[in-house]
Every structure is written in C-alpha cells, then in structure tokens.
Image (cartoon, rainbow, N blue to C red):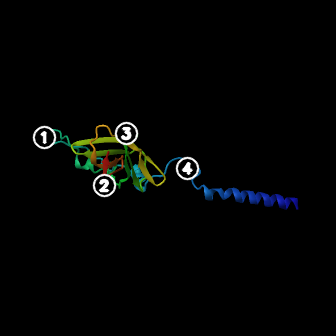
Amino acid sequence: MPRFVLIALLALGSLSLSSCSVFYPNAGATSLPQDLETTQMQSAEPTDTSEPSEEPGQGASAEPSASAAESPASILIETSVEIIMVVPEPDFEVLTVVAQMPNLVESGGTCTLRLISGSVEKTMQVKAEPSSDYTQCFPIELPLEGLPKGTAVVTVSYSSDYHFGTSKNQSVVIP
C-alpha cells in the first residue's frame, strides 16, 4: 500500500508540474516577439550581386542605381501611426503628446513630432519602445515656451529600419 501511495504522489506531482507550461508557454523565451515581415526581412539575403558599371565619358552618379534601391534590405513597410492624446499642460509648461503604432512590435524606431502654429514650426524626436501588441513613442513633451497661443496642428511620424508612417493631423489649442 505505501508503494501505491508513493507512485500516486509522484504521478500527481509530475502532472501538476507539466501543466505549468500551459500557463507559461514562453517561459524560456529570450527575446521579444517580432512582426512576421520583420523576421522575414532579417533573414532575407540580397540577391543582386551585379557590380556597378560606368560608361566612358560619363561622371559618377550621386544617385544609387535602381537595382540597389530595390534590394530587399531597403524595402520599408508603411504602418499606421495613431495619436492617443495631445494635452497642453501649462502647470508643467509642456505640450504632452502620446502616439502609438498598433499591431507593430519592434524596437529601434524613432518618433518625430511636428507642430505648426501660424508661422512657427517645431519638431522633436524621441525613441519608440515595443509593448505587448504595439509600439509606443516615449511621451513627447514639447516646451510651451515660444509657441504662439491659439490653434496648432500636430502630426507624429515613425521610422525604423523596416517601417515608416505618419499620423493624421490633429489640432490642439495652445493656452
């Protein structure tokens, strides 16, 4: 009888420990998930091995050849950029802008804020960071100093090695 109890306890313990993988399916993961396109682009090898040739009598061109511009490593995929909030905070003397790229998870990108108010144009660049199922710009805090009072137009653009995009214009009242 004690042997049966011991075997039953070992079986029960093994079963309970193996069920942990159901709750933690990525327990051994060492990196963040990436888009399918990003993974494919990283594994793609350029296939163009032709060498540039120059005809006699012509100078070197400052523009890259068409074949170099079309290589898989330089193809950018457009992504949507959404402005989540644009809030002037006079107490902190900043305009806070939060933006994200839904359904895109990658690191290494940058976000650029562009604000136009009358004849004044301001830009500010911040890094972007991945989250669970989107990429978010670090909160952009543009100083209110030097911005004219009234309505301004704000856009946020995103760029990385693999993606680019620009948000729709959003208006904000600068106090």
- The front one of 128 and 74 is 128
Q: Report how far apart the C-alphas of labels 2 and 1 lie in the structure.
A: 44 Å
Find disc 2 in the rendering and name its residue.
Answer: 168
Instruction: Tell whether label 1 touches label 2 (CB within 8 Å).
Output: no
Find disc 1 in the rendering and name its residue.
Answer: 58
Task: Say what secondary structure mark 1 lies in.
Answer: loop
4 or 1: tag closer to the N-terminus:
4
Q: Is residue 74 left or right of residue 22?
A: left
| Residue type, label 1 | Gln
4 or 2: tag closer to the N-terminus:
4
Q: Nearer the viewer, mark 4 or mark 1?
A: 4
Residue at x 28%, y 51% (from the top left corner): 70
Work out whether 49 lies above or below 20: above
Q: Position of residue 71 (x, y in %)?
A: 30, 50
Q: Report how far apart the C-alphas of labels 1 and 3 lie in the structure.
A: 57 Å
Q: Residues within 10 Å of mark 1 (few under 14, many from 20)?
A: few
Find disc 4 in the rendering and name its residue.
Answer: 29
| Residue type, label 4 | Ala
Q: Report how far apart the C-alphas of labels 2 and 3 lie in the structure.
A: 25 Å
